[in-house]
Image: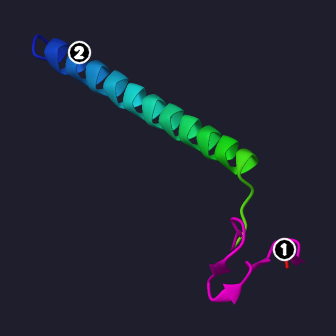
Amino acid sequence: MVGLGPQLGWAVVSSFASALLEFLLLWLVRDWLSLLNLVREAHPPTLFRSVGGGTTFGVPGGVWEVGSLQETCRH
């Protein structure tokens, strides 16, 4: 019985550290997903995006926007 005290104390500390690490990792993942969601709201995903005139991806005057199938260039 005398030797059980330190082992029990170490098990409690180890269990607490494991739970704390899991909580912090889940918190980090939640924050990362929240940040990605903000970026997606600010810049909706499109396959190609034309930035002004010129030749983009070999197409004179711009490219087609894939998301809405509208031409983003000006002729």
Residue mark closest to the camera, 2 vs 1: 1
Quadrant (top left/top right/bottom left/bottom right) for the C terminus:
bottom right
Main SS category, magenta section: loop
Residue farthest to the bottom, as pictured: 58
State the residue position of label 2. Answer: 9
Label ID, residue 58: none
Q: Residue at x 35, y 31 (%)?
A: 18
Closer-to-camera residue (44/18): 44
* Among the 4 quarters of the image, the one containing residue 66: bottom right
Label ID, residue 74: 1
Disc nearer the start of the sequence (2/1): 2
> Residue flagged by tag 2: what amino acid is it?
Gly
Q: Number of labelled discs?
A: 2
Q: Secondary structure at mark 1?
A: loop
Quadrant (top left/top right/bottom left/bottom right) for the N terminus:
top left
Number of residues whose C-alpha sits closer than 10 Å to that of mark 2, classed few (under 14), some (14–19) or many (20 or more): few
Residue 71 is covered by the magenta coloring: yes
Position in image of residue 36 (x %, y %): 61, 46
Q: Residue at x 71, y 52 (%)?
A: 43
Q: Is residue 51 above or below residue 54?
A: above
Q: Residue at x 38, y 31 (%)?
A: 21
Give the extent of the magenta segment: 48-74
> Residue flagged by tag 1: what amino acid is it?
Arg
Position in image of residue 65 (x %, y %): 79, 74
* Among the 4 quarters of the image, the one containing residue 47: bottom right
Number of residues whose C-alpha sits closer than 10 Å to that of mark 1, classed few (under 14), some (14–19) or many (20 or more): few
Position in image of residue 57 (x %, y %): 62, 84
Q: Is residue 40 above or below residue 5?
A: below
Closer-to-camera residue (27/60): 60
Closer-to-camera residue (71/60): 60
Q: Secondary structure at mark 2?
A: helix
